Image (tube, grey):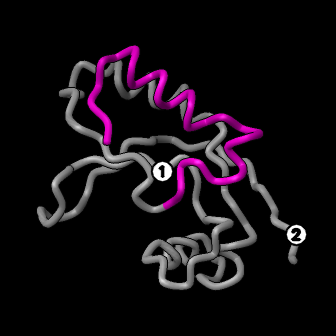
Amino acid sequence: MSRVIFQEIQCKTLINRVQGDSLPFRWTINPYRGCQHACVYCFARPTHEYLGYNAGRDFDERIFVKVNAPEVLRCELRNPRWRGELIALGTACDPYEPAEKKYQITRKILEALRDYRNPIS
């Protein structure tokens, strides 16, 4: 079994707008990039290529952890332009990735969404 690298990163934004209208939600949050579950069919694999990594092993073994995600989310939810729309959590990652045990980012994201009474799926 290979060694997984958790690379802590700072995100500038967390709420992502969905392109097109084929999904039942317009906004997503992904607290991690990459996934230790290593499902070969995962459609999110190519997202690693945007960072200069490959969609194969790097996706499984290099997990980007958005360590400031809860704070960034609270700022975004406070913004008067945010309309409190439904947000889908974990559309390109497993929000309960094994790294969650250490980082607890998903838990803090859910707490922020609860505090701002923002719907989540």
Image position of 50 (left or right of 58):
left
Q: Please report contact status of discs 2 and 1: CB closer than 8 Å, yes or no.
A: no
Q: Is residue 8 above or below residue 79?
A: below
Q: Is residue 47 above or below residue 11?
A: below
Q: What span is in magenta?
A: 93-121
- Report the quarter where the N terminus lies: bottom right
- Which residue shows up at 34% across the image and 17% down it? 116
Query: Is residue 84 in the magenta section?
Result: no
Q: Residue furthest left?
A: 21
* Percent x, y of residue 94: 53, 56
Quadrant in the rendering for residue 33: bottom right
Identify the residue position indicated by label 1 in the image.
30
Q: Secondary structure at mark 2?
A: loop
Q: Secondary structure at mark 1?
A: loop
**Amino acid type of disc 1?**
Asn
Image position of 95 (left or right of 57):
left
- Which residue shows up at 28% across the image and 51% down it? 17
* Percent x, y of residue 18: 25, 57
Image position of 21 (left or right of 26):
left
In front: 41, or 31? Answer: 41
* Percent x, y of residue 90: 44, 52
So how many labels did they put on this image? 2
- Which residue shows up at 16% across the image and 55% down it? 24
Query: Is residue 108 in the magenta section?
Result: yes
Image position of 65 (left or right of 19):
right
Q: Is residue 92 above or below residue 113?
A: below
Q: From mark 2 to mark 1, how far is it between C-alphas?
A: 22 Å
In front: 78, or 106? Answer: 106
Q: Residue furthest top?
A: 115
Identify the residue position indicated by label 2 in the image.
3
- Report the quarter where the C terminus lies: top left
